[in-house]
Image (cartoon, rainbow, N blue to C red):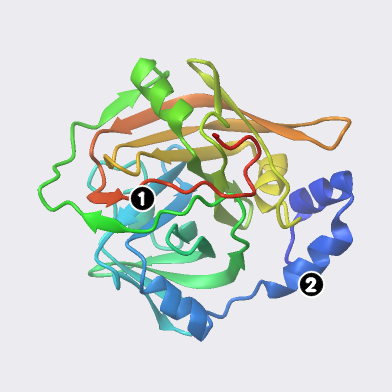
Amino acid sequence: MSVYHAGSRAVQDLVGVRDRADHVGRSLGPDIKTVAAAFLELQPLLVVGAADPATGLVWASPVTGTPGFVRATGPRQMSVTGGPPPGDPLAAALATPGTALGTIALDPRTRRRMRLNGRLRPTARGFAVGAEQVFANCPKYIQRRETFERVPDRAPGTRRPLARLGAEQTGLVAAADTFFLATVHSDGADVSHRGGAPGFVRVLSPGELAWPDYPGNAMFRSLGNLHADPRAGLLFLDWTTGTTLQLTGSARTGFGAGGERTVRFTVTRAVHTPAALPLRWSAPEYSPANPDNPR
């Protein structure tokens, strides 16, 4: 049985990488291996993605804690202590048994990332995810940040719901070298990482963004999901101040004659939270894979 659904297959065939995708897809499975379990326990940040059960809108949200707050508690189970703050767009989803949840743990210190997708079960201390797909990705487009510190006296600012992006939000997007993309399909959810030189995400208008889809592992899980279901959630974060910008809306992919791909995202709603995260990371060393790195 294929690990890919029809949406991913359609994009793989369009780009001509089905054989490569089949080879890479052998790494997908439900087991959390020893090296993956050890990786999880070192992380201070987990990004989760799902559809809100009431509205159907897809969001990506950050969850932080002292390393060890995310850990494998079985060969096919990940447990998380805590969750996003009350009022987060995914608070209801994370309290709903059976929610299809995508997660990604990204470590800028080592340029490693791990994705685990499955079904959620609320627990007394947070939530657990029964793993259905666990896999790592290559270090491409991850900016190295050598250290982080917790800022204990940092207090989150007022959460601001928005219908469109203003100057402050546009500036945050324009300066971003990283964001996270949540997508869904009929059987699950997924969160992926997107990285590039600052400016790789363009604000076309207060309600529309665009970014290039750089060559990756040929799975086309995110673009495949969008091919089947255009709903998407984006998370931008300021790695110094902890400010977050969460966007939900729809995305579509344009395919150029030369093989280049551009994703356009239309904003439905946004949430801007100053100083939302208690983490402060060191300055980035840009990935050598990024096109047009600053000189």
**With respect to residue 160, does 151 lie above or below?**
below
Q: Name the residue under label 1.
A: 62
Judging from the image, what secondary structure is the residue with disc 2 in? Answer: loop
Query: Residue drawn 50% across and 81% down?
Result: 35
Q: Can residue 52 be seen in this view?
A: no
Left or right: where does residue 111 sit relative to residue 168? right
Q: Position of residue 154 (x, y in %)?
A: 14, 45
Residue type at mark 2: give it.
Met
Residue 200 position (above or below residue 208)? below
Q: Where is residue 171 in the image (x, y as percent from the top left)?
A: 40, 23
For image coordinates 68% across by 39% down, the residue present is 213
Q: Are marks 1 and 2 in contact (CB under 8 Å)?
A: no
Q: Name the residue under label 2.
A: 1
Considering every residue shown, the one lying at the far front of the view is: 295
Q: How far from the left and from the top, in percent, is residue 46?
A: 39, 58
24 relative position to 239: left or right: right
- Look at the numbered disc 1 and give the secondary structure of its residue: strand
- Specify the quadrant of the image occupied by residue 149: bottom left
Q: Marks 1 and 2, Cα distance to the nearest angstrom?
A: 33 Å
